[in-house]
Image: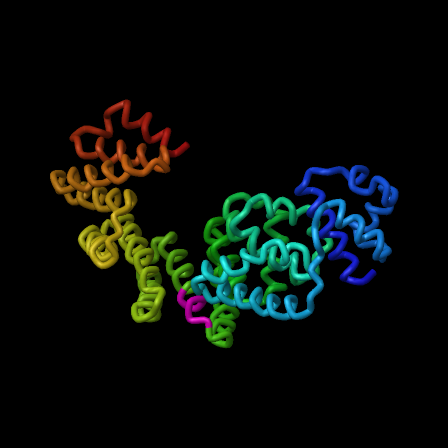
């Protein structure tokens, strides 16, 4: 069957699903349900008159204007380009959204809905219904974009599909998302194995952000292994690449990660220096930063200063309705550390058990 048959069938199924209507309800007086089922699967080249009636039944117009198709195919590719290079996408997205109805009912529908699915969970569920009718490239894009938001939810089969999708997409953007997955899974050697591929690809693409982002992921991996010299080497590359670019704000993550790692290595003075850079240079005053400052000060025996940092942490959390319960537990744990003999306090051990859980 032609790819257009699959697309038209997919659009019919998408719209019917959105309207929560059965096949029998849509095809009544037009064709038998089994024929509509074949159309939706793309296994038949449907009669144009029947298609027209089916679309009318769904109260939608199928956009066939070639000028519209050509112009908006370019705009869709422009959006994808912005995603891959980490450029601002909101203005481009809003422009596309103005033509939502036309795009959703045209041969550009699947590519548009893949973009839309990044902001709309319902669209993601709809696309999963027709995933088998996408082209290989469309399916890989969809899986990569879905993977961007599922760092901890993949089972092994889904993760394997994600890896394959990144291979098919064959861009530094996808491989970086794969590295973040490896980082969350503690598979640090896999991140190292991708270094030559990603750095070479990023240079060929002219994608400075991908190059810096890979160095940040690898530096973080070394930080997780308490290999501070290697961590500082890769983080130093990120700082050099980003400090004079439009992505300079990403350095706050670097400074925070350096500080957090150095605390685990008991290098408290230098840790506070980097946490201070994140706070002073970028105005970042999150609860996690104040928590790390407090921990470093407690370990240095500066309890009064630690208490100030904990008060600041509490103030930030009270203003944020989305503060996690784990953050409150971290706050309570740090407060207990400010008192002598806390290790012998049964309440402290109970609190640790809650934190671990």
| Res. 72 visible in picture | yes
Specify whether 105 is left or right of 151: right
- The span shown in magenta is 207-212
Q: Residue at x 53, y 52 (%)?
A: 118
Residue 117 in the image, given as x and y percentages of width and height: 57, 51
Image quadrant occupied by the N terminus: bottom right
Instruction: Name which quarter of the figure residue 169 lies in.
Output: bottom right
| Res. 162 visible in picture | no
Q: Residue at x 21, y 38 (%)?
A: 310
Colouring style: rainbow
Image vertical order of residue 129 relative to residue 353, above or below: below
Residue 344 in the image, given as x and y percentages of width and height: 23, 26
Image vertical order of residue 325 relative to residue 194, above or below: above
Specify whether 174 is left or right of 68: left
Q: Residue at x 86, y 41 (%)?
A: 29
Specify whether 316 is left or right of 64: left
Residue 333 in the image, given as x and y percentages of width and height: 27, 33
| Dominant SS in magenta | helix
Instruction: Name which quarter of the figure residue 292 lies in.
Output: top left
Specify whether 175 is left or right of 278: right
Residue 172 in the image, given as x and y percentages of width and height: 51, 66
Q: Residue at x 78, y 49 (%)?
A: 40
Instruction: Name which quarter of the figure residue 134 lies in.
Output: bottom right
Residue 322 included in the magenta stretch of the image: no
Q: Nearer the viewer, residue 334 or 213?
A: 213
């Amino acid at each position: 069957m032609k790819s257009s048959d699959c697309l038209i069938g997919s659009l019919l199924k998408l719209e019917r699903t959105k309207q929560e209507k059965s096949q029998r309800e849509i095809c009544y007086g037009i064709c038998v349900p089994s024929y509509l089922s074949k159309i939706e699967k793309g296994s038949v080249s449907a009669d144009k008159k029947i298609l027209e009636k089916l679309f009318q039944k769904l109260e939608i117009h199928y956009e066939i204007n070639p000028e519209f198709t050509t112009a908006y195919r370019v705009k869709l590719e422009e959006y994808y380009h912005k995603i891959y290079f980490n450029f601002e996408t909101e203005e481009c997205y809003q422009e596309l959204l103005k033509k939502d109805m036309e795009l959703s009912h045209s041969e550009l529908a699947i590519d548009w809905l893949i973009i839309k699915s990044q902001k709309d969970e319902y669209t993601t569920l709809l696309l999963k219904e027709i995933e088998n009718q996408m082209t290989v490239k469309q399916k890989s894009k969809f899986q990569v974009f879905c993977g961007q938001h599922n760092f901890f939810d993949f089972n092994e089969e889904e993760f394997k599909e994600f890896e394959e999708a990144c291979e098919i997409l064959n861009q530094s953007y996808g491989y970086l998302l794969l590295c973040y997955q490896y980082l969350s899974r503690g598979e640090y050697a896999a991140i190292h194995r991708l270094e030559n591929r990603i750095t070479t690809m990023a240079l060929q693409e002219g994608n400075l952000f991908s190059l810096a982002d890979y160095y940040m992921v690898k530096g973080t991996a070394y930080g997780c292994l308490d290999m501070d010299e290697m961590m500082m080497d890769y983080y130093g590359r990120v700082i050099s690449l980003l400090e004079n670019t439009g992505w300079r704000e990403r350095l706050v993550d670097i400074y925070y990660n350096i500080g957090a790692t150095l605390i685990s290595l008991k290098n408290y003075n230098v840790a506070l220096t980097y946490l201070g850079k994140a706070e002073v240079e970028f105005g970042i005053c999150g609860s996690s930063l104040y928590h790390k400052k407090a921990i470093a000060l407690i370990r240095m025996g500066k309890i009064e200063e630690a208490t100030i940092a904990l008060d600041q942490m509490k103030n930030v959390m009270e203003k944020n309705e989305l503060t996690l319960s784990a953050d409150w537990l971290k706050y309570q744990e740090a407060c207990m550390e400010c008192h002598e003999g806390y290790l012998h306090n049964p309440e402290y051990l109970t609190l640790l058990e809650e934190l671990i859980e």
